[in-house]
């Protein structure tokens, strides 16, 4: 039993270290989502020029697979009920943290055994700078007849360029699955 506790804590630590994806969605409450039976992957927009062709194809495949699982069929853009746009945005971000260590004694009002007074103290501050990329994937569902946006799902998370291909593909699939989980609105969750 004592061996299981450190193992469980280590697994919990690994799960906490894995970057998560923050998901939001919005939709047109007047749209009749029951009428949408087919889709077309219409456009891929990469605002930062960062997403490689390989990752664009991975994203498109993941979106296609999820919509097919939901019972929609893929058609060309002239006959599809909805057009699906994928939009990516990559931002370069920086987190700065400071840690100060104080050494010695100091402060006029600090009580000492021999009474209050001035004392000598010094401190060192170290700064840690963490530069990373934050990626946003937006999946837009547009009514093909009216050309109005009827549903949008957004996933935001920290990008990790060091992952191998299988992990990268799995993370993209997972993010797209989470983004499209609430499409169509009101559908039972699987």
Image (spheres, rainbow, N blue to C red):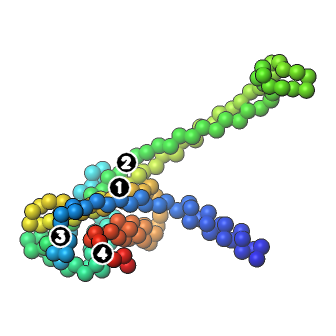
Q: Are marks 2 and 1 in contact (CB under 8 Å)?
A: yes
Element at label 1:
strand
Q: In which quadrant of the rendered view does residue 12 lie?
A: bottom right
Q: Earlier in the sequence, mark 3 or mark 1?
A: 3
Identify whether 128 is placed above or below 87: above
Element at label 2:
strand
The answer for how far apart the CA atoms under marks 3 and 1 are is: 27 Å
| Residue under label 2 | 91
Residue under the image location 32 percent in, 60 percent down = 25
Q: In which quadrant of the rendered view does residue 42 lie?
A: bottom left
| Residue under label 1 | 136
Question: Which is more foreground, mark 4 or mark 2?
Answer: 4
Q: Earlier in the sequence, mark 4 or mark 2?
A: 2
Q: Position of residue 146 (x, y in %)?
A: 9, 62
The answer for how far apart the CA atoms under marks 4 and 2 are is: 33 Å
The answer for how far apart the CA atoms under marks 4 and 1 are is: 25 Å
The answer for how far apart the CA atoms under marks 4 and 3 are is: 12 Å
Q: Position of residue 89 (x, y in %)?
A: 32, 52
Left or right of 134, for residue 46: left
Residue 15 is at least partly visible in this image = yes
Element at label 3:
loop
Q: Are marks 2 and 3 in contact (CB under 8 Å)?
A: no
**Count of numbered circles in the view:** 4
Left or right of 42, for residue 169: right
| Residue under label 4 | 187
């Amino acid at each position: 039993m004592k061996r299981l506790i450190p193992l469980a804590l280590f697994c919990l630590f690994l799960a906490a270290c894995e970057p998560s994806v923050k998901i939001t969605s919005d939709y047109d409450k007047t749209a009749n989502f029951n009428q949408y039976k087919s889709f077309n992957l219409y456009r891929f927009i990469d605002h930062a020029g960062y997403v490689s062709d390989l990752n664009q194809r991975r994203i498109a495949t993941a979106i296609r697979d999820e919509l097919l699982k939901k019972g929609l069929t893929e058609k060309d853009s002239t006959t599809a009920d909805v057009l699906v746009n994928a939009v990516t945005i990559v931002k370069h971000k920086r987190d700065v943290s400071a840690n100060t260590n104080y050494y010695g004694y100091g402060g006029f009002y600090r009580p000492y055994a021999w009474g209050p007074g001035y004392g000598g103290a010094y401190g060192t501050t170290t700064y840690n700078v963490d530069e990373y990329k934050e990626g946003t994937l937006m999946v837009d569902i547009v009514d093909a007849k009216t050309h109005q946006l009827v549903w949008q799902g957004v996933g935001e998370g920290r990008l990790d360029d060091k992952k191998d291909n299988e992990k990268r593909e799995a993370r993209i699939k997972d993010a797209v699955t989470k983004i499209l989980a609430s499409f169509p609105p009101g559908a039972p969750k699987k």
